[in-house]
Image: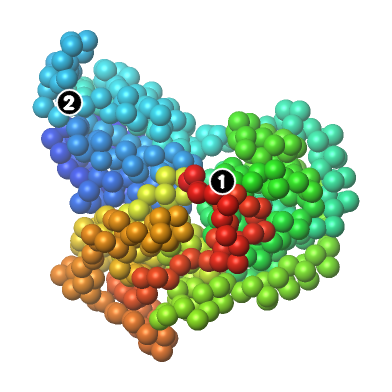
Amino acid sequence: MNVSEYIAAFLATSGVRTIYELSGGMIMHLLDAVHRDGRSQLINVYHEQAAAFAADATGRITGIPGVALATSGPGAVNLLTGIGSCYFDSSPAVFITGQVNRHEQKGTRAIRQLGFQETDVVSMAGPITKAAWRANSADEVPKLLSQAFDIAVSGRPGPVLLDIPMDVFRSGIEVSVTPWSRKQPQSNHDSSISPSTLAKLAEDLSAARRPLILAGGGVRAGNAHQQFLDLVDHLQIPAVHSLLAVDCLSDTHAARTGMIGTYGNRWANLAISRSDLLLVLGSRLDIRQTGADTESFAAGRTIWHVDIEPEEINNRVRGCNSVVAELSDFCSRARTSLTPNHCPQWHEEINALREEWPDIKELAGCDGINPNQMVRMLSAGRDPAAWCVDVGLHQMWAAQSVEISPDTRFMTSGGMGAMGFALPAAIGVAFAAPERPVVVIAGDGGFQLNIQELQTVAHHKLPVKIVVFNNHCHGMTRQFQDTYFEKRHVGTVNGYSAPDFAAVAAAYGIHSIRVSHQDEMEPAVDRFWQSPSEPVLLEVQIETSTNAYPKLAFGLPISEMEPLAKPMEMEST
């Protein structure tokens, strides 16, 4: 066989059911080999960035690295935003790019380019991958491919890139195909998770009167979700979550307390401010979670921080008790070492805060449709495979108000914060979990970044249901301009426009619904869910001035939130 045929067989026997690609000359041998092999399905998208986002979502939902292909030059470079999103959000993925023939590469010559579309994507991808290599010979490919899959899922997951010249793709190779299989993670039994460490944590937890768990994206990324659930059920203490952990606890779970951070639920941020012990599981405690005032975030409470990466602990928030460990291992061992802390008065206090500051009343009295109320109505009693949410104000309304069922995922671009993520991600989920519909929540601005992928949805008749919150602007940056730039809406309202999304959907053969008034919401939602297996686009007209609240007042403690408090300084992120 040749290298292309080897790769096709390796991917198929390693559990890769779908491969996302946009065809190009330097990967044509590989595309042909995958087609002839027939066991993995090639999904042609209409921009390589979409291929990367689809692979991201596939890796998150299956635990097997998502795979995307691109040709040399612009094709490979177009993957980079999605690769970066995988890296920052710990999504396992393997990207294979084509490169010009070895004899067409510039090598050490002091020129910019020798072969047509020759581009050093390995150097470009290096800082946003766990590994990036170029295969310089056919014999290297089997080992590099196997290593790529191992590295993508080991430790903190992430993307790996393998760049292969065209002549290597067609080179012969004499080796049998060895399928990849996930290795069991090495349990971390160093001093940070020693019996004495667990004993000290047990002592602190027993003494706490207002303990909280903070769940981060590492719970899902570390394949520790079931162990996390077991620990939460055992400890019986409330649990808040970050943006990337919206789906760690279902909406009906007794411990679910809400999202914290810049746009977190007000009652959850207040709970953080009143807590006396915080057990942080797989969360980076970045500025979007803690606010800029890290001293007040740490003051008055004992913090135990568990993460697989030691550099993430005591990075911004200092004085934390450090536990460097696989979350699955930690949760399992903590469940047998820690005593439950029932703290009924603390639960009652949090419930009272939730009743005092409900999410749907943050925008009470807003003109037109209340987006938080719309999200509640969309999600109540629903069980899609995933909510795939783009980046912007709608992202915050969704995270604040979505009702999550036990088997539903919530996916968004967190660290990269890449607009255009949601629609391609939903395509990845639709192929990975085809039994149930997938819901996209996007804004009018972000949706236009990968709007071409409506054709992928239509072509494959995918059960992707799309909600576009149309506020006729780039809303999150418009809100930023309102606060810091005297409402000069350069590039957000002024100079910005959007198409008729109903007409666009119709052009792709997708049914559409538009809702503009509060009293239209319920019948529109009923129509949206009427045919679970059919794609549909629901456009929700939102007033341009509608903000996302609460929002941390920058420079103040996490308990101080807009619009009741005003920021002390300009946000740095």
Amino acid on which disc 1 is placed: Ile
Instruction: Tell me: 497 left or right of 520.
Output: left
Q: Is residue 35 visible?
A: no
Which labelled disc corresponds to residue 154? none
What kind of element bears circle 2? Answer: loop
Q: Nearer the viewer, residue 47 or 545?
A: 545
Residue drawn at x 47%, y 49% is: 414
Q: Which mark is residue 287?
A: 1
- Mark nearer the N terminus (2 vs 1): 2
Whether the residues at callouts 2 and 1 have beta carbons within 8 Å, the answer is: no
Residue 61, image x, y percentages: 46, 52
Q: Which residue is mark 2?
A: 118
Find residue 70 and report its image quarter: top left
Residue at horizontal 81%, vertical 36%? Answer: 197
Task: Judge by depth and name the residue closer to the eye, 144 or 356.
Answer: 356
Location of residue 387 by image quarter = bottom left
- From the image, state whether disc 2 or disc 1 is nearer to you: 1
Q: Position of residue 394 (x, y in %)?
A: 42, 65
Q: Position of residue 160 (x, y in %)?
A: 39, 33
Q: Which SS class for mark 1?
A: helix
Q: Residue at x 60, y 67 (%)?
A: 564
The N terminus is located in which quarter? top left
Residue 491 visible at all = yes
The amino acid beneath tag 2 is Glu
Badge 1: residue crowd in 10 Å (few <14, some 14–19, many ≥20): some
Rendered residue at 39%/47% (across/down): 56
Apparent side of residue 454 relative to residue 184 in the rendered image (left or right): left
Q: Residue furthest front?
A: 486
- 193 up-or-down from 560: above or below: above
Q: Position of residue 107 (x, y in %)?
A: 21, 13
Q: Is residue 548 left or right of residue 37?
A: right
Give the CA separation, mark 2 to mark 1: 39 Å
